[in-house]
Image: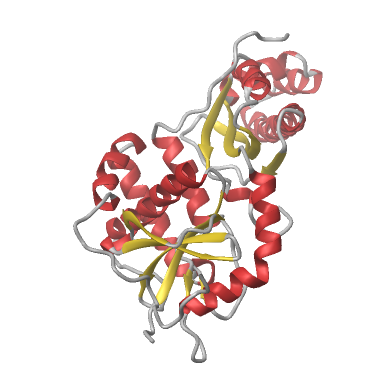
Amino acid sequence: MLNQTSMEPTRQGRATLVDLLDRVLDKGLLINADMIISLAGVPLIAVNIRAAIASVETMLDYGLMRDFILPQILPQDTPLQSPPNTGFHPPD
Amino acid sequence: MTARGLYIYCVAKGDREEPLDLCGIEGTPLWALTDQGLVAIVQECEPKPFASADQKVFANWLLIHQNIVDLAWERYETIIPFGFGTVILPTNGNSARQNLNEWLEKESAEVTRKLEYLKNKAEYGVQVLWDPNVILPRIREQDAEIQQSEKETRSKPAGVAYLLQRKLEELIRQRLETAADVHFKTFYHRIRECVENIHIEKVRKEDPPKQMILNVSCLQNKEAMTALGAVLENIGQMPGFDVRFTGPWPPYSFVTAGG
């Protein structure tokens, strides 16, 4: 019964996109603290996102999606001078 | 002091506080903020839940989140990813940044321990689907009760046959359910033996006639995937079964308390 070939994992394809978005949406570190809000506490939004996933899923697979997203997040010309929330300076 | 919130993507080990050459949701610049030898990848945001009535906008944010987490994963090698939409708020005179630092200080031992545990590991999704149309004839062949019930149904007049047919369908449904359960257990144990950690996920609805009978998230060393791959290849070659094997993903399913 031992098979010599080994299946390789993939990050491509529609079913894979759903598998990934399920993780991004429902998982990851959750912190229970007053100072933190997360979508876990906003069920209606999660439902909206499920619908959004379904609509995106029909349009594009993950490979194309990456090409679509990357230009949005890669370097911009905006100069970055000070860290956010500069009211607090961490020790050097 | 501003009253902005901090949207957090992930934490990793690091001690360089710096702007990252990346933009996050709504084109806002990303920062690596440090404390306690840990680095949090964040962007500023409104101090409220992320909401948009536009589903495409929402989906876009979700994908930006994942891509940022992915890029951070490449850069820092081991990360603890946050789920989409986690915002650290300013509270009681504390800025969100102060709250972030307080959290890192409080949790640094646990976060560091978790990062050690996750080193070199990645998450993989495994789903096994079956086609009942292919499986059922094999069950029928070996099941005397189904065979007997089919024979009886055929031999009775229409009215009685209708009722018997209903009974037969229920019997078949039960047999398929039992078979799915047996296969689930067998596959689960075979997969479990090849990975560091495993979580059972809810099965998803598939396009008929296919049905998902197993959905798990696995945590495994990225360099030691051969055994799992071989088991999955083997399952995928069984008639009537299909295997989906996705990843490597950041370890989203293995970062909750006790995970």
Query: Residue B221 at x, y = what percent?
Result: 64, 33
Q: Residue at x 75, y 26 (%)?
A: B190
B31 left or right of B109 in image: left
B167 left or right of B242 in image: right
Query: Residue B130 at x, y = what percent?
Result: 59, 26
Q: Residue at x 26, y 61 (%)?
A: B27
Can residue B81 be seen at all in this image of the molecule? no
Looking at the image, is A91 positioned above or below residue B27?
Answer: below
The residue at the far front in this view is A92
Looking at the image, is B139 positioned above or below residue A24?
Answer: above
Q: Which part of the image, by quadrant, shows the N terminus of chain B?
A: bottom left
**Figure disc tally:** 0
Q: Quadrant of residue A67?
A: top left
Query: Residue B176 at x, y = what percent?
Result: 69, 30
The residue at the far left in this view is A77
Q: Residue at x 71, y 19 (%)?
A: B139
Looking at the image, is B234 positioned above or below residue B92?
Answer: above
Can residue B116 be seen at all in this image of the molecule? yes
Query: Residue A28 at x, y = what percent?
Result: 56, 55
A78 left or right of B209 in image: left
Q: Quadrant of residue B180?
A: top right
Q: Nearer the viewer, residue B100 or B236?
A: B100
How is the model colour-coded?
A: secondary structure
Q: Nearer the viewer, residue B217 or B146?
A: B217
The residue at the far bottom in this view is B92
Q: Nearer the viewer, residue B86 or B185?
A: B86
Looking at the image, is B174 positioned above or below residue B15?
Answer: above
